[in-house]
Amino acid sequence: MSLNIERSKDGYKILQVEIDGKKQYIGSKYNHAREIESFISSFEQFTDKDNYIVFGLSFGEHIEKLLQLTQNESKILIVEINEELINYCKEDEHISKIINNPRITIAQTEEEVKKFFREYINQMNVNNTQIAYYCKYDRAYKDNLAYIYAIIKSEAERIMADRNTSIFFGEDWFESLLANLKYMAQGTPANDFYEKYKNKPAIIVSAGPSLNKNIGKLKGVENALIISGGRTLKPLLEENIEPTCLCVIDPGEVSYKLVDGAIGNVKCPLVFYDGTNPKVVKEHKGDKIFSTNNKFINDIWKEDIITLSGGGSVAHVMTIFAAYMGCNPIVFIGQDLAYTGEKGHADIAKNKWQNMTFNDYKKDNDIYVDDIYGNKVRTSLTLNGYRLALEEIIEAFSDTRFINATEGGANIKGAENKTLEEALSELDKEPIVTMEKFLRNENRKKDIINKLEKTLEIFKECILLCNKGRRILGDFKTNYYLKNQNKLSYNIEQLDKIDNKIREGIASITLIDTILFNTMFDIENKSEFIITSSDNKEEIFNKNINKNEAIYSGLKSVIEKCYEKVEKTIMEMKEE
């Protein structure tokens, strides 16, 4: 179908489309310039932190204006579902120059939207993502855009959830890493288990409300790996079922409370990472397998240790680990991802120290999704996000067979629905080799101490550089107001050298990444430092100076705080 292009009274190209049998214009027949101004005025202001999502390409005039008014660092995603229009614009000489700008991305599909988020939207700037609709584009294509809206919302919520977790747990992660180093020293990197259980079945045990139905059927199962999270450890042990391995990732106190009284007696290996609650790691007496999110650990082991995290819950970690080990099929039980029977968890997996009812779980923004029987089941936005993330993992391991033997809860796309009894009956009868066979027998304690001592030296250098940077900033400010251009150039040269050295230092001490995030996030998002389009030259200068002073001060404060803790860790490791 050819495009129906007309001219507005004021000379702009406008598009007439037919949707649901009704013809309508994307734009104004009479005063299209007003539509462009209306679009631009929908933004309160333009800042150097902003990225933009624009619904509607039209013929690019509004995008050209947006490019002129926004910062060179700002990226613009244009959502346009009319492929004919996109092709027309690519072939038009003037419009193609606009949309070929490296700041521009055009998206039609979910994957293209996700790619934009992966490349340009992060924890630091997610709050500065501005969304606008051109010429009532959202109304014209409301039904067609529903899937794009859902992806944008999901991606933004995922990043914000990760950011909030980073802010909340940043200091805990740092302290957990320091506390867990001595256990990692004698542990085995998860890499050593790559495809060690190729085509061997694994059962992922989660704590959803349906777990009560079939947990007992795992008793005596020796022909599959049984992988448990912390919440399901006690229910398994109470059924006299010893898991093949236990995964605990949460840094919070709750993760310890869930295994308190049982973790010291469990015989199976513990799978953890540097941010796992250190009391869990300490009280577990058996062998340990670890992953990491931190380059500091990789540098010590001189290898890229796999990062098992992804999706937001321990169930995702267990699934990724099972797939990484080559397990096939992977069977889920207790993976309701919904409030089956108006319950938050299985009765056997509830918090014993809290008397929580369903009223404590449910929220006004809960939604209903398809369950495994084709009916509707209530779930939360968080649980539904977990379901979508699990489906992405399943899709990523397309050669692996996944079976949902939860016998209740939300339907999981990509997983076959079966009863646990049916799933078990299909498995090979050959017993599983224990994980102990693949463990390392080494101690990296000396390597860790050496790395920590080198870190202290870098800390000292960075503190000196921060002090020097603050002094030169003072000189720079004075010379700016005195208009002493020669000294200003010299100051800029000095500051560039200092900043480069600090960046090099920070890049080599990733040990403090998690705790440094909070400080940098606060500085980057302080309104008093954000440059807007209405700022004059002097306001921009003062904002930049004040921001740099805050960075030097904040960085110095973090490093001084971390110095004492690293020094203490070294002393404790040497004494043991």
Image (cartoon, helix red, strand yellow):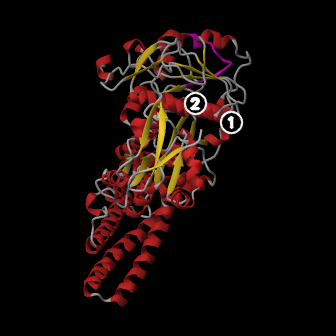
Give yes or no for residue 221 being in the magenta stretch: yes
Give yes or no for residue 296 being in the magenta stretch: no
**Mark 2 surroundings: few (<14), some (14-19) or many (≥20) residues within 10 A:** many
Q: Is residue 190 above or below residue 479?
A: above
Task: Give the mark toward the camera: 1 or 2.
Answer: 2
Q: Is residue 313 above or below residue 28?
A: above
Identify the residue shown where x is 74% and y is 18%: 430
Q: Residue furthest toward the front? A: 9
Q: Nearer the viewer, residue 481 or 421?
A: 481
In 3D space, how far apart are the residues under numbered discs 1 and 2 (Cα atoms)? 19 Å
Q: Nearer the viewer, residue 546 or 133?
A: 133
Q: Residue 203: x percent and y percent?
A: 60, 22
Q: Residue under label 2, please give it.
A: 319
Q: Is residue 351 left or right of residue 97?
A: left
Q: On the image, which quarter does residue 240 sit in?
A: top right
Q: On the image, which quarter does residue 254 sit in?
A: top left
Q: Is residue 284 left or right of residue 160?
A: right
Q: Residue 101: x percent and y percent?
A: 52, 61
The stretch of residues the image draws in magenta is 217-227
**Mark 1 surroundings: few (<14), some (14-19) or many (≥20) residues within 10 A:** few
Q: Nearer the viewer, residue 223 or 530?
A: 530
Q: Is residue 395 above or below residue 494?
A: above
Identify the residue shown where x is 39% and y is 73%: 465
Q: Is residue 421 visible?
A: yes
Q: Residue under label 1, please give it.
A: 438
Identify the residue shown where x is 50% and y is 35%: 311
Q: Secondary structure at mark 1?
A: helix
Q: Is residue 346 left or right of residue 544?
A: right
Q: Earlier in the sequence, mark 1 or mark 2?
A: 2
Q: Amino acid at mark 1?
A: Phe
Q: Secondary structure at mark 2?
A: helix
Q: Residue 519: x percent and y percent?
A: 34, 56
